[in-house]
Image: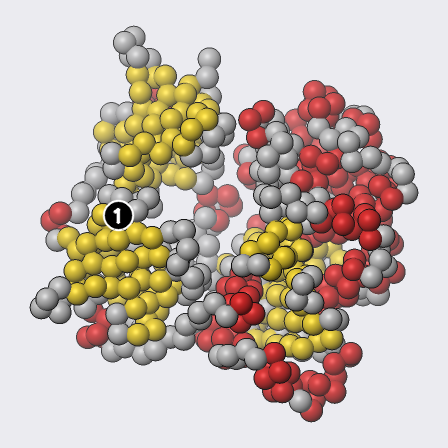
């Protein structure tokens, strides 16, 4: 999740008329002001570059590339681009497709004959890998990978052993379910077909011909000048990498493998990425028919190695990327002629900035934080219960944190008028508080202005449901393990959750921690109204569980034989 100034084609514009560039586009409030606002909050450190019809119209950097030495980012800073890397892999496959060396409906085994699980290899096509419709699980989320010595993962064949751990969820085959495993396999297939290593192939076929001299694959022990360090405070890292959950800012270096790979981990600059996107459009890399085939919208937002979708009447083609301390967005807007490259070296840095630019283009309302004193903010502190909407029954607390509100110990809302606030990381979500006849706060409406609306009322602290953890040992918790599958109706149809034991709780899919509070009942640690209620038959055997919020059943899950 990631962010700053030097493209030669617009040098005169930058030197003489940079303010006019923004004025010509008509962005108000200015993107400069917005970036500085987010930087001051510690929410953006990186570089933004925007071109229109291949002419640079905006370039800005703000933040810190290396906090140990207090080195600022600049317009030539290199950033980890995470899953934006997948576009390079997709182009590598597309080139082989143009040369007739691979077919989209070929199987894995057609080109990777020693793939460890032959049944999966024989049934899975190149098209399915490119479009994330293979149903193959993501080994990056499995213990075998998370507990390995990642510093020894340098060549693609070093990952071959993890393919033995993957599974196919048959209910997901044919529908888009994002899995990094797909692109790791594609990288190996490139090696098998060409006889050269993946890194050499991409450099010789993509980077070198386009003059992308500031792009490569991250390596821990390789000296790369002007490279930003990624910094994270994301608490989820405790689950995957054992990072202390203390809220302190940490470099992401040790969370990464020794070298980037086909699924993520390349580094680049905004200039190189604009060059790459331009080359895709002008047939410098692929012919127009192939580019169209690989970027054709499919209704689920993902084409063949490219995100491709339409929102607010605007089509987007490109890719986003995110990791701890890494955030990137590179998209082309065909009908508008814009290409937007945003690179940041902090958690979730790029998406809000990209959304702000789209708001400028569409005329969607944007918000500017105002200052409310402590007394004015304290009116909103208290306890609430949602009484309308899909989160009906959820109880939460709102607290004052300096100049804003902390919502449910997670979301941060900043004021834009006396009784209204916007989500700092997703400003389409707003809170508008209501008052009773005496002018006291009696509730709020929480909405994104589109599909989501929830209404809440104030409640007294003694009305809050207090669930206490029920101490269970591992032997007791083991009775709740097994193979389960979500039903066809409700949430996550066909999903097979992985349930493990961790520190007296159940860990679902490696990241959702459910705490026991009664026999056969567990609450989500971060949202106590989200619960698992296990079901038993007359023989007292567990047959499944319900995912519940209040009295509502969100998902029915059966235990498999």
Image quarter of residue 140: top right
Residue at the location (39% across, 59% down)? 449
Q: Residue furthest top?
A: 539
On screen, residue 528 versus residue 198, left or right, reads left
The correct choice, above or below, for 476 with respect to 57 in the image is above
Closer to the camera in the image, 357 or 190: 357
Nearer to me, 415 or 433: 433
> Total of numbered circles in the picture?
1
Q: In the figure, is residue 477 to the left or right of 211?
A: left
Residue 208 place in picture, x, y as percent: 86, 60
Provide residue 161's location: percent of width, then percent of height. 68, 31
Using the image as rendered, state which of residue 483 and residue 384 is in the foreground.
384
Residue in view at x 77 percent, y 28 percent: 107
Q: State the residue at coordinates (71%, 85%).
A: 13
What is the crowding at mark 1: few (fewer than 14 residues within 10 Å), some, or many (at least 20)?
some
Is residue 67 at all visible to an observer of this figure?
no
Say which of 481 and 337 sits in front. 337
Q: Is residue 309 above or below residue 158?
A: below
| Color encoding of the figure | secondary structure
Screen quadrant of the N terminus: bottom right
x and y, in percent, of residue 363 in the image: 50, 70
Tag 1 secondary structure: strand
Name of the residue lying farthest toward the left = 438
Left or right of residue 286, residue 346 in this image: left
Regarding residue 350, the answer to whether it shows in the image is yes
The residue furthest bottom is: 16
Question: What residue would you read off at disc 1?
Answer: 388
Task: Name the residue rendered at 35%, 25% in the picture.
Answer: 545
Q: Position of residue 182 (x, y in %)?
A: 67, 37
């Amino acid at each position: 999740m990631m962010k700053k100034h030097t493209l030669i084609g617009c040098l005169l514009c930058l030197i003489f008329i940079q303010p006019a560039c923004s004025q010509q586009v008509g962005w108000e409030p200015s993107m400069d002001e917005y970036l500085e606002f987010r930087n001051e909050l510690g929410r953006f450190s990186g570089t933004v570059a925007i071109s229109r019809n291949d002419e640079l119209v905006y370039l800005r950097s703000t933040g810190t590339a290396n906090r140990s030495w207090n080195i600022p980012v600049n317009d030539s800073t290199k950033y980890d681009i995470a899953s934006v890397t997948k576009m390079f892999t997709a182009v590598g496959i597309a080139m082989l497709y143009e040369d007739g060396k691979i077919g989209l409906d070929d199987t894995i085994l057609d080109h990777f004959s020693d793939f460890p699980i032959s049944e999966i290899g024989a049934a899975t096509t190149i098209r399915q890998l490119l479009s994330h419709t293979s149903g193959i699980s993501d080994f990056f989320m499995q213990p075998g990978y998370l507990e390995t010595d990642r510093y020894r993962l340098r060549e693609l064949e070093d990952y071959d052993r993890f393919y033995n751990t993957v599974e196919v969820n048959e209910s997901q085959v044919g529908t888009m379910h994002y899995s990094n495993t797909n692109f790791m396999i594609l990288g190996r297939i490139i090696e098998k077909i060409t006889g050269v290593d993946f890194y050499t192939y991409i450099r010789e076929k993509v980077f070198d011909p386009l003059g992308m001299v500031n792009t490569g694959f991250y390596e821990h022990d390789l000296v790369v000048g002007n490279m930003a360090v990624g910094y994270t405070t994301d608490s989820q890292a405790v689950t995957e990498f054992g990072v202390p959950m203390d809220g302190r800012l940490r470099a992401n270096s040790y969370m990464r493998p020794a070298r980037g790979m086909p699924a993520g981990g390349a580094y680049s600059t905004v200039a190189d990425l604009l060059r790459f996107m331009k080359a895709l459009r002008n047939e410098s890399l692929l012919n127009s028919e192939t580019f169209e085939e690989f970027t054709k919208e499919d209704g689920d937002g993902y084409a063949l190695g490219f995100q491709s979708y339409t929102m607010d009447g605007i089509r987007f083609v490109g890719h986003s990327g995110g990791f701890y301390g890494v955030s990137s967005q590179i998209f082309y807007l065909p009908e508008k002629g814009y290409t937007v490259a945003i690179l940041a070296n902090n958690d979730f840095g790029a998406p809000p900035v990209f959304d702000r630019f789209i708001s400028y283009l569409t005329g969607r309302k944007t918000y500017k934080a105002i200052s409310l004193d402590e007394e004015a903010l304290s009116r909103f502190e208290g306890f609430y219960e949602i009484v309308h909407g899909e989160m009906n029954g959820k109880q939460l607390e709102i607290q004052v944190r300096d100049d804003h509100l902390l919502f449910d110990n997670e979301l941060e809302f900043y004021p834009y008028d006396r009784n209204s606030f916007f989500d700092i990381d997703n400003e389409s979500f707003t809170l508008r508080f209501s008052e009773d006849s005496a002018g006291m706060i009696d509730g709020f409406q929480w909405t994104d202005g589109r599909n989501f609306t929830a209404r809440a009322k104030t409640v007294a602290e003694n009305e809050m449901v207090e669930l206490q953890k029920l101490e269970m040992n591992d032997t007791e918790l083991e009775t709740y393990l097994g193979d389960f599958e979500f039903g066809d109706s409700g949430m996550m149809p066909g999903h097979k959750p992985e349930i493990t034991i961790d520190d007296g709780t159940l860990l679902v899919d490696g990241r959702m921690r459910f705490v026991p509070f009664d026999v056969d009942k567990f609450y989500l640690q971060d949202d106590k109204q989200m619960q698992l209620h296990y079901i038993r038959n007359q023989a007292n055997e567990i047959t499944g569980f319900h995912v519940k919020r209040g009295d509502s059943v969100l998902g029915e899950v059966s235990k498999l034989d």
